[in-house]
Image: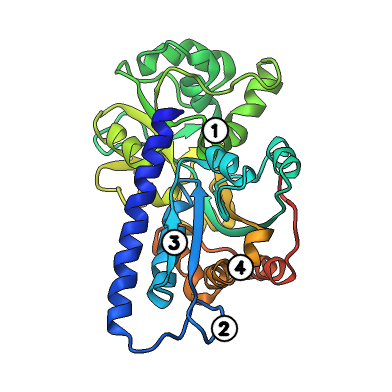
Amino acid sequence: MTNTRDKVWLKTLLVALALALVGAACADASSDTDSGGGGGDSEALSGEVVVSGSSTVEPISVAVGEKFIAENPEVAVKIDGPGTSDGFELFCDGQTDISDASRPIDPEEVEVCEKNGIEFIELKVAIDGLSVITSVNNSEVDCLDFHDLYALLGPESEGFESWSDADDLAEEIGAGHAPYPDVPLDVTAPGEESGTFDSFGEIVMEDIAYEERKIKEDDPVIRPDYQASANDNVIIEGISGSDTSLGWVGYAFYQSNDETVKALPIAEEGDDCVEPNPETISSGDYPIARDLFIYVKTESADRPEVQAFVDLYLSEEGIASVSEVGYVDLATEDLEETRGVWESQETGSREG
């Protein structure tokens, strides 16, 4: 945890510095002190907005932060992405104003927040399609279903060093695309601190592990022996560095690196494999789609700079950041529901 936290604060400093430079340039170019960012205040805003959590949601929040600081150069915006779970730990400890999350908050995390007197507003902001990726040079595999993924990445695959090591397990559980090639299986993927790790386990693995394989409830559903990282760019490097790699990331990270990694089409079962793209993710045809969130501490929401930041986040200008960084926009009715929750300051989780 110590090493991860050190990297977290290094990223915080880098992001804060980048946003500060943008703000300084805008301040030099402007002759007045009127504030923007959707706050509607005629006086310049000051203070700070501290955002932490999901590395998947981080690019959206950074894009919104750049837009916000351009209009509010006196506000310090600090954004980092140690992972959803680490972000909720900081949030429920009262250390952050906003927690980025690539999964809903867990009941256990809600309990910690309640114990510490932290109330929050849950805001759905985007849709993601978890992309199962390999090297662009991997021509051996072109479709996988959930049982294939379990055979290769589940708890019973611990120790498998080649794709073909999973053949017997795949046959036993009825995976659709075995036998696999006899080549090294180099797995690089999110670690346990990541909401992307949790979402992949919940969507792909849990039913097979707990219901079909009768693994003890709450036991891990993803093999522990792989290169794990909270940094999506490290995952991309690992996947692109091996021709027979396997892993998963959020859709935006795949899309922005599609010259070095490719997304494998996925099916829940059989051969009806679907590629991730904005249309299939939005429609739900892609089977590993999930919602993305920000959580706002209600006490922080009373501060003008935080209120203005979230106002901008949910404005047309701010929410455009979702597609600008490569994720999928909410349906109109879902976005309006999110805006209604923010306007009414409705607290608590509807998703967790």
Query: Residue 309 or 304: which is nearer the viewer?
Result: 304
The span from disc 3 to disc 4 (Cα, nearest Å) is 14 Å
The quarter of the image holding the C terminus is top right
Query: Residue 271 or 45: which is nearer the viewer?
Result: 45
Cβ atoms at labels 3 and 4 below 8 Å apart: no
The span from disc 2 to disc 3 (Cα, nearest Å) is 19 Å
Amino acid marked by disc 4: Arg
Q: What residue sits 31% from the left and 15% below the top? A: 182
Foreground label between 1 and 2: 2
Query: Residue 62 or 152: which is nearer the viewer?
Result: 62
Q: Is residue 276 above or below residue 206?
A: below
Circle 3 residue: 77
Query: Residue 281 or 320: which is nearer the viewer?
Result: 320
Amino acid marked by disc 3: Val
Q: Residue 137 at what x, y percent from top left?
A: 24, 35
Q: Residue 130 at what x, y percent from top left?
A: 49, 43
Circle 4 residue: 303
The span from disc 4 to disc 2 (Cα, nearest Å) is 13 Å
Circle 1 residue: 270
Amino acid marked by disc 1: Gly
Q: What residue sits 70% from the left and 49% below the top? A: 118
Residue 40's disc number: 2
Cβ atoms at labels 1 and 2 below 8 Å apart: no
Q: Earlier in the sequence, mark 3 or mark 4?
A: 3
Q: Earlier in the sequence, mark 4 or mark 2?
A: 2
Cβ atoms at labels 4 and 1 below 8 Å apart: no
Q: Secondary structure at mark 1?
A: loop
Q: Is residue 229 visible?
A: no
Foreground label between 1 and 3: 3
The span from disc 1 to disc 3 (Cα, nearest Å) is 47 Å
Q: Residue 219 at what x, y percent from top left?
A: 64, 18
